[in-house]
Image (tube, rainbow, N blue to C red):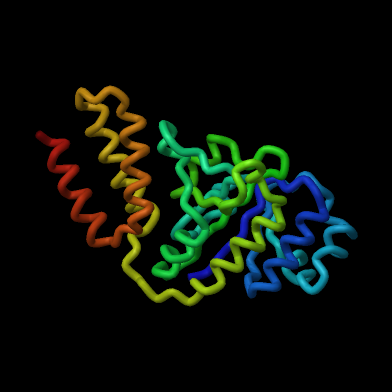
Amino acid sequence: MEIRVVLVEPEHDINVGYCCRAMRNFGFRELVLVSPKCPLGFEALMYSKHGADVLKAAKKVRGIGQAVEGCSLVVGTTGIARRGKGVIRNPMSIAELAKKVRRVKGKVALLLGREGMGLTPEEIRLCDFLATVEADGSYPVLNLSHALAIMLYELRGAKGGTWEGLAPRKERQELVKAFGRIARRGKVRDPAKITAAFRNVVERALVSSLEARSMLAGLKDAETK
């Protein structure tokens, strides 16, 4: 398992620099910056310290699609553990995430949003699931670089996973689409919400290719009836 850190529209050089330093501290090197709003100048370089090589090698892209290309899993991060009715936004803890990605052979994209507002709902929908650093409820939002450092500390033990059965992202997406088509044909009250819940189950389970293909075959058979 490999980690690709993706910073979405970072706003401050100091935070980018500290993120690079944290990545270097924990042995992660791949950084992608989506439409950075800061100049990535001397201040970013200064605060990166021995992570300057991470900063210099960082790839800049215009959209999240480019940033996560080739990744087996896309994990969005949030500072607030929203639970309840909005099933699509229920995050897992970083400790739980580390246990899951340990099983993945492939690349995992870790998306961190803007310092001011985080990831948008549209961006969250592009993620396979959400993770959060569990902090005190009275002030749960951490600084960008501090949050990343905690995440990487937990995830460093998951490096080198060898479980090869995870279904490709495209296969998992096809499974969710097939379920969604059946949900829309039925008499359920909110097919979009049910489909979102099904997607959460699929992603949290890290289904294998065999499992995905078996379920997809069953769903496609149900579609014809």
Vertical side of 219 occupied by 17: above or below: below
Q: Quadrant of residue 19?
A: bottom right
Q: Is residue 62 above or below residue 163?
A: above
Does any portion of residue 67 appear in the rendered image? yes
User: Residue 169, image x and y in percent?
Assistant: 39, 54
Give the quarter of the image for residue 18.
bottom right
Image quadrant holding the C terminus, namely: top left
> Image point 35% across, 71% down: which residue?
164
Left or right of 114? Residue 73 is left
Quarter of the rendering containing residue 103: bottom left
x then y, percent, for residue 68: 54, 54
Q: Residue at x 33, y 56 (%)?
A: 205
- Expressed as whole percent of the image width and height from the top left, the position of residue 197 reads 34, 39
Residue that protrudes farthest toward the right in the picture: 42
149 up-or-down from 224: above or below:
below
Is 65 or 98 nearer to us in this picture? Answer: 98
Q: Report how many numbered discs are placed on residues in the image.
A: 0
Q: Residue at x 48, y 70 (%)?
A: 1
Q: Is residue 159 left or right of 30 when viewed as pictured?
A: left
Q: Nearer the viewer, residue 111 or 140?
A: 140
The residue under the point 48% across, 64% down is: 98
In the rendered image, the residue lying farthest to the left is: 225
On the image, the x and y values in percent for residue 101 come to: 44, 65
Nearer-the-camera pick, 6 or 194: 194
Q: Is residue 62 visible?
A: no
Q: Is residue 98 above or below residue 35?
A: below
In the image, is 4 to the left or to the right of 194? right
